Image: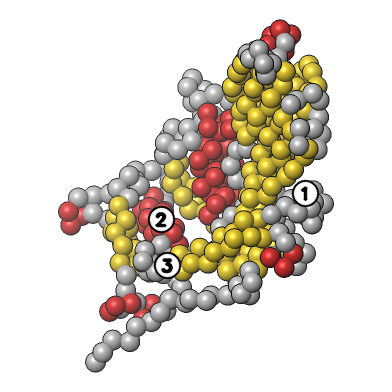
Amino acid sequence: MLIYVWKKIDGNYQKTAVIDYATSVIWVSRYRECGEFEIFIPASKELVTLFQGDIIFTRDDSETVMILEKFKLTTDEEQGDFLILSGRSLESIFERRVVSRQTELDGTLADGVFTLLDKFCMNPVNSEWEKKIEGLRFGSSYMFGEHLEKQITGDTLLTSFTDICTVYDCGFKLVCDDTPNKFEFRLYRGRDITDTVIFSPQFGNLAKSEFTFDYSQYFNYIYTAGEGEGKDRVIIGYESDEIDFSTLNGLNRREYWLDERNCSSNSDHPQSDTFYFAALQSKGREKCKELRPVVQYTGEVVNNGMYKYHVDYELGDTVLIENEYGIQAKATIIEVTEVEDESGYKIVPTLSEWVTLKDYFAPVIIEECR
């Protein structure tokens, strides 16, 4: 695995070394979170000097850019002296920025993400205590036109982007130009390759699968309580869109109280009341999806060489899962771990929660005794 070392000199990252002598490398790329890495290399005085400072690592065969966050020197007369370099991917810079002012997002998904980047990274309004991240730009995201209603205060940008991308089933990444001094934020979605990439015991790439259905934490009507006290408190109801509303009565109705007092209507939004009620209902909708009947379908993905990374699948692609009993599901590749050591090179994809293709256990409608 060939890794380039970039060190910040006079305000810019410059390529200063190439690592092709590592004892082991672990390189993890993620779909909607920051990745991480760990590199073991034999120690020398020159390398100890080199890796002190602002360091970034890149590879020709990976878009993921890593930032050195931890430097560790170990000495051992028998095993030898080693440097252990570790850290996270470039996306971790968004953990350094907080949504420090109440921010309402009411538009397309792409516009909402751009608003966060623009206000807190690219063109901060209060330049005295909100600092610009140089070299950052927003890439074209015209395909992300879903409507986004969200109010954010106090979260980091990394948490905000992860939460948004999880709800809207997409990913984000920072892609560098020729040097790490300029980089572009991109929203993206993987392909649906369920026709060509299948994990199944039949193909020897799926083992130890489990399928569980759990109704114990299922709720279908959410009371979202916002600001106010006593009889003046704002309360918005949201009923599940998975069941006909006329059946949400008697034993079929499962109510849940959601306290969202921190969601505020004190806003500069031109339609603040309308937006506030919609924001509360949006929180109820998100909670209702979280409290669906739990279908847990898991298993151990085995990399037997049948599918190759960057050839058959990419980070973010959706694949098909099928067990011995014909239960099928879709899952997204949300993480790819590459390991290279004395045993050779191996790669392990990690899948998201598996979503069954057939509603094996639809919500049961109970007919009450008359």
Q: In which quarter of the image is the N terminus?
A: top right
From this view, report whether residue 9 is shown above or below residue 210: above
Whether residue 232 is visible, yes or no, is yes
Q: Residues within 10 Å of mark 3 (few under 14, many from 20)?
A: few
Q: Can you tell which quarter of the image residue 9 is in?
A: top right
Image position, residue 90 (x, y; %): 64, 32
Residue drawn at the location 39% of the way across and 69% of the way down: 215
Whether residue 187 is visible, yes or no, is no
Residue furthest to the bottom in view is 370
Residue drawn at the location 37% of the way across and 55% of the way down: 280
Q: How crowded is mark 1: few (under 14 residues within 10 Å), some or many (20 or more)?
A: few
Q: Name the residue under label 1.
A: 309
Q: Mark 3 points at which residue?
A: 214
Residue furthest to the front in view is 78
Amino acid of disc 2: Lys
Q: Do the residues labelled 2 and 1 touch (CB within 8 Å)?
A: no
Front position in the image: 106 or 109: 109
Residue drawn at the location 41% of the way across and 58% of the way down: 287
Q: Name the residue under label 2.
A: 283
Q: Can you tell which quarter of the image residue 320 is in?
A: bottom right
Image position, residue 324 (x, y; %): 64, 72
Q: How far apart are marks 2 and 3 (CA)?
A: 23 Å
Residue drawn at the location 46% of the way across and 73% of the way down: 242
Q: Distance between the residues labelled 1 and 3?
A: 34 Å
Going by the image, does 224 lie left or right of 359?
Answer: left
From this view, report whether residue 46 is shown above or below residue 190: above
Front position in the image: 113 or 290: 290
**Label 1's element?**
loop
Front position in the image: 189 or 290: 290
**Label 3's element?**
strand
Going by the image, does 342 lie left or right of 350?
Answer: right
Amino acid of disc 1: Tyr
